[in-house]
Each structure stands twice: as structure tokens, then as C-alpha cells.
Image (spheres, coloured by chain):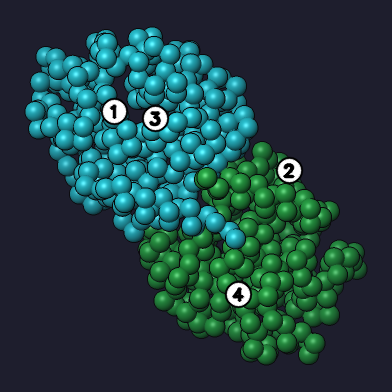
Chain colours: A green, B cyan
Amino acid sequence: MSHRRVETPFGSVEKALGGSATFGALSASHFSSPQVVAVVGEDFTDDHFAVLRKRDIDTGGIERVAGKTFHWKGRYHQNMQDRDTLATDLNVFEHFDPKVPGAFRSAPCVFLGNIDPTIQLKVLDQMEKPRFVGMDTMNFWIESALEDLKMVLKRVDVVFINDEEATQLSGERQVLNAAEKILELGPKYVVVKRGEFGSLLFGHDVCLFVPAVLLSKVVDPTGAGDSFAGGFLGAVAHAGQIDRATLAQGMVYGTVMASFAVEKFSVDGLLGHDRATIDLRREFLQSMTTYS
Amino acid sequence: MSHRRVETPFGSVEKALGGSATFGALSASHFSSPQVVAVVGEDFTDDHFAVLRKRDIDTGGIERVAGKTFHWKGRYHQNMQDRDTLATDLNVFEHFDPKVPGAFRSAPCVFLGNIDPTIQLKVLDQMEKPRFVGMDTMNFWIESALEDLKMVLKRVDVVFINDEEATQLSGERQVLNAAEKILELGPKYVVVKRGEFGSLLFGHDVCLFVPAVLLSKVVDPTGAGDSFAGGFLGAVAHAGQIDRATLAQGMVYGTVMASFAVEKFSVDGLLGHDRATIDLRREFLQSMTTYS
């Protein structure tokens, strides 16, 4: 969970509700019933909790402690892809020791949001044989905590990563080679996110591509990646088995939810869409890539 | 037609056979029987003609005149997308007055390669009601010959353009908005080429996306765009009617031929592949984007 100050060419918001867990859970809530494990400060209000609960998200694993919520301040460039981090205040994240409630430990599907890999491992250690685990990471951890990160990679089914991070982690420039190198580190699947250029899923016997939804305006790219992961894992959690079709649905729903997320500031894009609106975008993506 | 000196991070070639007409015709020759109208200098050898004739390309419209063939010298950056033009010598292009042989004038399908739009118009004026016309252009003509370019745009079925050129021509940053603005200029379809990120086709009632073929090594990106256009128009010329399925086949075969072109220096990637190899890549593209 985090509070953010975001500036984009279309305006800015203060104290926006944000964070991997928030975007991920709100996105997944359209497909399954997420339970959140996170830490927030005293400035995380009842209104913030209400946004999550309204979407039937179990907030029983959100710990509220003394201090301020994690705060990120950034400014997006005109292309809405590049961004400058203006400030990162760990605040309550600094001593976060995640405790997974007993009722959450048998969850079949787990998303490890972008955080210190040692914290990701602590969460994973408390889970009882989840069927499917996804993880996110970022350049900061690749640079500063590579060995810990590799321990997490060995234990997950899918890693969500962007183009630059894939190159950084693998030393390979071509996405095909980068994905192969990352698969050697342990995950069953690698999803490479490329913003407006879509996303790719690589596995040892599967390769999928989903284009981004074409938008006439992108307002706030923050949270696109977490919304993607939430939609992906929500769809996978909802499905009966992990096969090619399930992974493809994950990719498509992840893409659709990311497209909703970037159309409005903060998490607003993830609220107010029903399943019919979501499925309209899914159908359009499939029609764009049907060649016969 | 042109002679090129190309440097890429993988090496360099002198006097490579190149040019829109060469790449376009060699690519199209896998699907139909291209006829070429072009001008070359005395340095364009019989061996160069032989490469084209071996692929059953009609070279009856290639004029050989005194002087040197058009020469381009460039250097590609490490990412194989950005390039610096080191030299452009128009040579025989400077006074090119294209004459379309009588036997060529009833061709149903025409590709106007990247050249001065007034020359594109001169070719088009000599054609007898072609069923489908495609054109290429580049930043240089958008800057220096916009009004002439707009006259060509009004008269073609499809314009092939890259992301940057689409933004430059339309003033729009988002590809969806750029394509809409360009459609207003007259062409029935706009194909936006995005290199390793695939390509999009926009029409008033159709929208298609084809991902790029995933390659572990790109040796020479020169000619990718012309190979795309050649494959696209070759497939369209071969098809019976212009409908969604035909356009989709054009996009897919264009993508496949561009992928072969960039795997080797000069035109070598366009030679030596039979239809079965081509169709293997086509099938892979379709499988990557099949979600059920």
C-alpha cells in the first residue's frame, strides 16, 4: 500500500491511493476474491479501506502501524512511459514483517508485489502449497538484492517484468533471448510487459502475445503493471486448471485491466467497470489478432 | 534501386544491393509476379539484374542511365532501430522521370516506394485503374513536400508509415489518434510499422494487429519496411478480393518477410526461403495470438 503524489502531462493528484497491493487486489477483484497482506501508516484512512471492502476484498491482512504509509512521488514524461522518481520514503515499509492470517494461508493463487525480495520470501514461506505464484520486481532490487531475488524467482510460476528490467536481469537485448535466460533462473513463465506495445508470455512450451488496448488518452500510467498482474492472477485463480488457454485469458484480462487503470488517476479506472465492459475489450483484442 | 554502405553492430557491407524497389519486389515475388519500374546507374551490374530475374521479377521497367546509382550510407545504433544517415547521394534519382512500360500499366496492384511524391504521382498517372495501391514515405518528404505527399495520400488504398512518421504527419502522439487523422487525408487504410513491436492496420471499419516475429538476432534492419510492403502487396495481389481476411494475410506475410529481411545483410534474407518456411512463421504468429 502507498500514498503517492503523481504528476503527468494531464495534471496531478496528491495522496492518491496506490501501491502494488491496492492496484493488484482491485484489478483481481473483478475475477476472484482477493485477500490482501500489507502494511499501512496512520494516514491510511477508513475511506481507503472502504474502497477495497466495497469490492469484496478481504483487508484482514492489512496491518496499520504507527508512522506514515510508504510514499512515492514521481513525474511522468510527455510520452507517458518514462518517469522520474522524485521521492521514495519507505516509512512503515522499512520494518515490515509480513504476517499472513491463518485464513489466507491456503490461498491457491498468490501475487508477490514489488517489494524487497526478502519480504516476498517471508510471505511465500507462510503459504501452504499455493497452486500458482506470481511475482513482480523492479530495477532497484535487480541492482541491490540480486541473490535474494534469484531465490524468489526459483519458487514462482510467473514473473512479471518490463523490457528494460528483462534486459537488466538477463544481460540480453533481444526479448526472446532475455526471456530464455530468465526462464533458466527458475520461473515456469516470464511475462514481459511493454506498455503501449503489448505484452509477451514465454514458457518452455508456450509463447503468447497480447497487444495493448488502443487508447486515445493515457492519463496516469502508475499502477498499470500491478493492474496487469492482478487481472492476470485473478483470471488464473478463477480458472480450473493451468493450461495454455488459462494463461492466455490471464494475459488478455491483465491487458484489459491495465488499460482501464491508465485512463484515470489513481485507482479510479479500476472501479465502475462491470464484467460486460471488461469483456468488450477482451473481444476487441481477440478480433484485432484474428487473421482469417 | 540503390547501392548502400551499411554499418551495424554486427559488421558492414559495401555496395549492398538495396532500395525500395529491390526489397519490395524480392519480397513480393514469393506471392505474385512483380514488375519493377526504377532507375539505376552504370554501376548497377548484370549480377544485380540476375538476382531479380532469378526470382521471376520483370525488370523491363528498370532504366539504366549514365551516372551513379542512388547511394545511401548509414550506421545503425546498438538497438538496431535508430540510425544515422551518413550520406545520401541522389545521383540518377535527381532527374528520374519514370516511364511505366505499356505491359505494366494494367497491373492490378501497385507499390509506390519511398521517393519524391511527385515521382510517385507520375507513376500513378500512367496506371490504368489499379485495384489496390500502396505507398511508402518518410520524414524527409513530410517535412519538404507535404502538399505533394497529400495528393498521393488521397489516391492510395494503403499508406505504410512508422510510428514517428505517423506522429509527424498527424501531430498526434497516440497511435490511435494519429491513424484517425491520417485516414482523414484520404487513404482507405493506414499501416503503422513499429519494428520489433509489430504493426497495426487501421481502416474505417477494420483494426488489425500483428506482432513482430521474435528473433534472437537482428543483423541488418535496412529494407525491413520495403520487405513488409512487398509481402503485404504481394499477398493482396495474389488474393481474389480486398476484404478483412486479405488485409490480415497481407499484414502477416509482410511481417514474416520483414523478419527474414533483417536476419541477413542486404537482400540475402529474402532469398532462399520457400513457401513452406514462410508459412511456418505465419502459423507461429497466429498461434502466438490465439487465446482460446
Residue A212, horizontal then vertical, whole percent? 59, 50
Closer to the N terminus: mark 1 or mark 3?
A: 1
Q: Residue furthest front?
A: B240
Query: What chain is tagged by disc 1?
Result: B
Observer able to see residue B140:
no
**Pointer 3 residue:** B237
Which chain hosts label 4?
Answer: A
Residue matched to label 1: B34
Q: CA distance from mark 1 to mark 2?
A: 53 Å
The quarter holding residue A19 reads: bottom right
Q: Amino acid at mark 2?
A: Gly
Asked if both marks, 4 and 3, belong to the same chain, the answer given is no
Nearest-to-viewer mark from 4 and 3: 3
Both labels 1 and 2 in a single chain: no
Of badges 1 and 4, nearer the viewer stands 1
Chain ID, mark 3? B
* Residue under label 4: A242
CB contact under 8 Å: marks 2 and 4: no
